[in-house]
Amino acid sequence: MALLQIAEPGLSAAPHQHRLAVGIDLGTTNSLVATVRSGTATVLPDTQGRSLLPSVVRYLDAGGSVSVGYDAQAEQSRDPANTVVSVKRFMGRGLADLSDTATQPYRFVDAPGMVQLVTRAGVKSPVEVSAEILRTLKARAEESLGGELTGAVITVPAYFDDAQRQATKDAARLAGLNVLRLLNEPTAAAIAYGLDNGVEGVYVVYDLGGGTLDVSVLRLTRGVFEVLSTSGDSALGGDDFDHRVYCWILQEAGLSGISPQDSRLLLTRAREAKEALTEHGETRITVLLSDGQAVDLSMTQATLHDITRTLVEKTLMPVRKALRDARIRPEEVKGVVMVGGATRMPHVQKAVGDFFGQTPLTNLDPDKVVALGAAIQANVLAGNKQTDDWLLLDVIPLSLGIETMGGLTEKIIPRNSTLPIARAQDFTTFKDGQTAMSIHVVQGERELVNDCRSLARFVLSGIPPMVAGAARIRITFQVDADGLLSVSAREQGSGVEASIAVKPSYGLTDDEISRMLTDSLAHVTTDIEARKLREAIVDAESLAEATRNALTSDGDLLAPEERQQVETALAAVATAIARQETRAVNEASAALNRATETFAARRMDRNVQRALKGQNIGNL
Amino acid sequence: MNADFNQDHFALFGLPRRFRLDDAALDTAYRKVASEVHPDRYAHAGDAEKRLALMMATRVNEAYRTLRAPLARARYLLSLAGVDTQEETNTSMPPDFLMAQMEWREAVGDARAARDVGALEEVSANLARERRGYEAELAEALDDRSDTVTAALLVRKLRFLEKLEQEAGDAIEALLF
Ligand SMILES: Nc1ncnc2c1ncn2[C@@H]1O[C@H](COP(=O)(O)OP(=O)(O)O)[C@@H](O)[C@H]1O
Ligand SMILES: [Mg+2]
């Protein structure tokens, strides 16, 4: 959309045109949506004033109607098989990755790459379930902001791998959201905290939610948020504490072989007990099981702390690891920001405090801070903020590698490299006349391919036939700012661009997404064609406007005939818009994009030179 | 594309082309340049510009990574001077270095076998000290004497040390986590 304007601090582009952008915290347990209004980030509540949306989706009938949030949550023990909770744990995960399927009330089906759930509305992938949550939040935002959203920043645990990130992005696309960026949750928290408090130095964000633990070490320097390292455990969170309490109840009450309904009910009671013990020294647990049996127990804070001590200890491992990777000693840390509902537990706070030798920062609402940070970022990315006084430099959480002989991995991009990053690797053929080869990309730190996550298998074909070892195929692995991987290949000698067949080991193909999208829109009466035209025109207009602004401010960078080319492309956009044809508008936009490539490069160069000069003057 | 992509890493950050580098000045320059080219600055821009930002930001990160690490920086300076460091091909080393090398390797191996994190950390610290000694020699060879032959040898030595440090680090991690 609007081109070039963000690099022009002084130049305000149509200030009246505030683009509606939101930040979404798509949590394991709870999700939230926030936006920046009149310069302040605020969480958008539902019509009843509730900020949180429980991440619970219940399938109501075979037609696929759903209830999402509190209503679904209220029914979960009555209808456990059709009420999906903590779906985030299944995102981008195969059946083999899930350790606790036995205690889950769902019927899982193993699909290639990602598990699916059997519901009364049919087999659902975690991506589809998550899309329902996102759709609800999108509707909430559009209703309360009174317009269509331009885009959204969706947060993900920093420790999410490529498969989990891709699944999240797919879910957002499925929900009809334009994803401006996937943002790491701890980084979002740091933005909200850091910008509010104007802090400098090294900070640690410790985010213990319902299903995941995320740890990031960041350095804040004059508006730059530089992630030094990140670590975590994508299967450790408040749910595990619930589970310990649940097991304790089973044991104390001598229960075994209980039904899925009772199991769900006990888990709910376990969680209530855990939460109550944050404030109180003791709590009662009473449950009436379906066979009429009554459970009545009393649990003390000391007992809770006792049975979850190993879990708390386990959360400190990623903290140690992140510090080690960042080459930071605990005493160099200026502050520890606590995020996530589970950090309310006093023994968690104490353990973290003891580790760092300082009281953790708990003055933020641990439920909201991630969504607020995402909203602040979304506001900037949508182009609403003209002064770019801060920047985010994030890292890739897990190493990327390829499979080599004997099922071993060879690392290509090491974890905690600053994004974006690209690495090229040369390969050759091992047989005469070989025209194809296959490459297996994995993510993880372990030596054996089987212990890492399989991301994709590529088949390179169209290699010109040569003697063995003569071809030199350079494969470039590019990871973008969202932490998502793309791959390209080229035969160096002949310059032949080898074609790549991408077979993701997970996730959805574009075709699948568009089919699901059509399915979900089938019963909606919006005219999809009209909507496409409107979107194309909005994009084209803002591109044209930004180009005109750029010509005004930096037109001197173009020779007269170069300028003429840009002007011609601009005129073509106007003509296409007048014709009201989606394809023509898109083509004209694409042509304008191409016509401004060199211009954009020169402008970028000029801005870099200006920035460096500014620095030199500042240093004198 | 224009000069952006052909500039050397030092010019990119407006820094003098030499081994002795002011880390703080590099950090500051990196943040300035990264701020201008980061894809976040172009999230609402046209596709062409988005692609350009991704390429430039990737390039800037690569340049920073290269200059920030002394071994990579030395290797890069040598490559700018047209000198091949022969890290894969030239394995001949002075005998005293080979001896020291063997002792280091043994120390790492013993500590790993004994699952002794303290000992591994001590070896790491010693290796780091040794490495800094070589880095000081590199500064003299490259900046003061333009002695690229010695510099290339030092790069090969440093490469050995770095691999050992990595091994010790991996061993520590394997024991700790
Ligand atoms: N007062 C409390 N005491 C203990 N745990 C709590 C409390 N409030 C919320 N939690 C726990 O926090 C977790 C949810 O945290 P949240 O940050 O919302 O998770 P997520 O980011 O995974 O959606 C749940 O396990 C919940 O039981
Ligand atoms: Mg969370």
Image: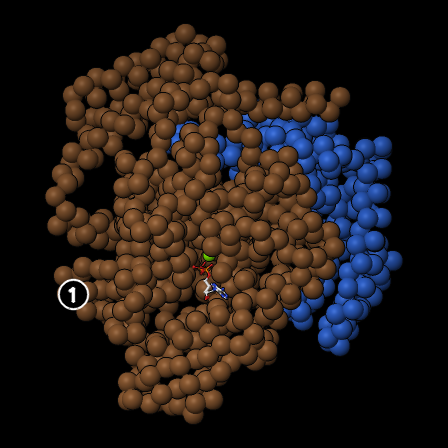
Chain colours: A brown, B blue
Three-letter amino acid code at the position of disc 1: Asp
Asked whether, in this view, residue B3 is left or right of residue A547, the answer is: right
Asked whether, in this view, residue A566 is left or right of residue A314, the answer is: left
Q: Position of residue A563 (x, y in %)?
A: 39, 11
Number of on-image labels: 1
Query: Mark 1 packing: few (<14 Cα in 10 Å), some, or many (20+)?
Result: few
Q: Above or below — where is B63 with respect to A297?
A: above
Quarter of the figure that contains the C terminus of chain A: top right
Tell me which corner region of the image, top left, top right, bottom left or bottom right, holds residue B126.
Answer: bottom right
User: What residue is disc 1 on?
Assistant: A61
Quarter of the figure that contains the N terminus of chain A: top left
Q: A101 or A603, which lies in front?
A: A101
Residue B12 in sight here: yes
Residue B82 in sight here: no
Q: B74 or B36, which lies in front?
A: B36
Q: Above or below — where is A55 with respect to A223?
A: below
Q: A352 or B157, which lies in front?
A: A352
Asked whether, in this view, residue A571 is left or right of residue A452, the answer is: left
Q: A141 or A205, which lies in front?
A: A141
Q: Residue furthest bottom?
A: A254
Q: Above or below — where is A27 with respect to A395?
A: below
Q: Above or below — where is B68 with respect to B122?
A: above
Please give the name of the residue rendered at 20% of the width and 35% of the height, measured from the top-left corner. Answer: A532
Q: Position of residue A260 (x, y in %)?
A: 31, 80
Q: Secondary structure at mark 1?
A: loop
Q: Position of residue A342 (x, y in %)?
A: 51, 64
Please give the name of the residue rendered at 64% of the width and 65% of the height, measured from the top-left corner. Answer: A350
Task: Please report, as a chain letter, where disc 1 is located.
Answer: A
Q: Position of residue A589 (x, y in %)?
A: 29, 25
Tell me which corner region of the image, top left, top right, bottom left or bottom right, holds residue A441.
Answer: bottom left
Asked whether, in this view, residue A72 is left or right of residue B37, the answer is: left
Please give the name of the residue rendered at 64% of the width and 66% of the height, measured from the top-left corner. Answer: A351
